[in-house]
Image (tube, grey):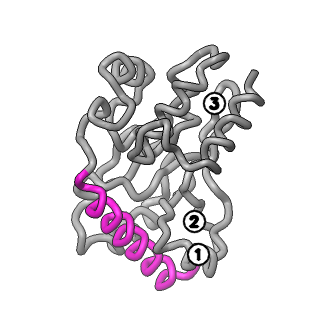
Amino acid sequence: MKLSDVQFDRLQRSTQPFGRIRLKSQFGCMGLSIDGVTFALIANSQLWLKSTEATRDLFCQMELYDRFTYPKRILPMRINYYRVTEAVWLCPQQCESLFYQTYFHVRAFALSQQRLPSRIKDLPNVDRALERRLWHAGIRQVDDLYLLGAKASFLKVKARPKNELKLLFALAGAIEGCHSAVLPKALREDLIHWHDRLN
């Protein structure tokens, strides 16, 4: 589960203006962060870069379409990280620009979200009891919840997801920053449909 020395050196050189890359085990993968901002994962000896609204077009131009799937017991979850292809690795300048832009925009997004609480219990819909359930499931920071998303977090917390739609709405609301009662209609319908398929 590691990159070659050449690949890692290229990644570090590209992001050097921002600081030193730190590695941390995260959901069975290796998370890469600078100053606490996770911008990439290493899984299956591949590098997966976090996509943001600002990098979506860049990722499309470089034909990064293979999205990371986080394996789960019931349903696999796709998260917003895309595999760096061999074609990109073979073009050093393109590669370094991609890494720089990815971290730059992920950091900008993280800074815009700094008003978010540092503890999960301070998010909407999350009380101490739910925070404990998340903690026992290995979701211990706000970033962990955001990385996984509502569906994957729900599956980690609830071994038997039957009749737990309220929990799913609460997690989605926590991530969206709103009370579960005012979730966007399209999101609510998607969650209901997804939950129904589990049961």
Residue corresponding to mark 2: 84
Would you identify the image quadrant in which residue 129 lies? Answer: top left
Looking at the rendering, the stretch of residues picked out in magenta corresponds to: 90-115
Is residue 107 part of the magenta span, yes or no? yes
Is residue 93 part of the magenta span, yes or no? yes
Spatial distance from mark 1 to mark 2, Cα to Cα? 6 Å
What amino acid is found at the position of numbered circle 1 in the picture? Val
Residue found at the far front of this picture: 181
Q: Quadrant of the C terminus?
A: top right
**Which secondary structure type mostly characterizes the magenta part of the structure?**
helix
Q: Secondary structure at mark 3?
A: loop
Circles 1 and 2, Cβ within 8 Å, touching? The answer is yes
Residue corresponding to mark 1: 88
Residue corresponding to mark 3: 72
Spatial distance from mark 1 to mark 3, Cα to Cα? 29 Å
Report crowding for label 1: few under 14, some 14 to 19, many 20 or more residues within 10 A (C-alpha). some
What amino acid is found at the position of numbered circle 2 in the picture? Val
Residue at horizontal 34%, vertical 47%? 23
- In the rendered view, tell whether residue 153 sits above or below residue 176: above
- In terms of sequence position, does the residue under pointer 1 or pointer 3 come before the other? 3
On the image, the x and y values in percent for residue 8 come to: 41, 62
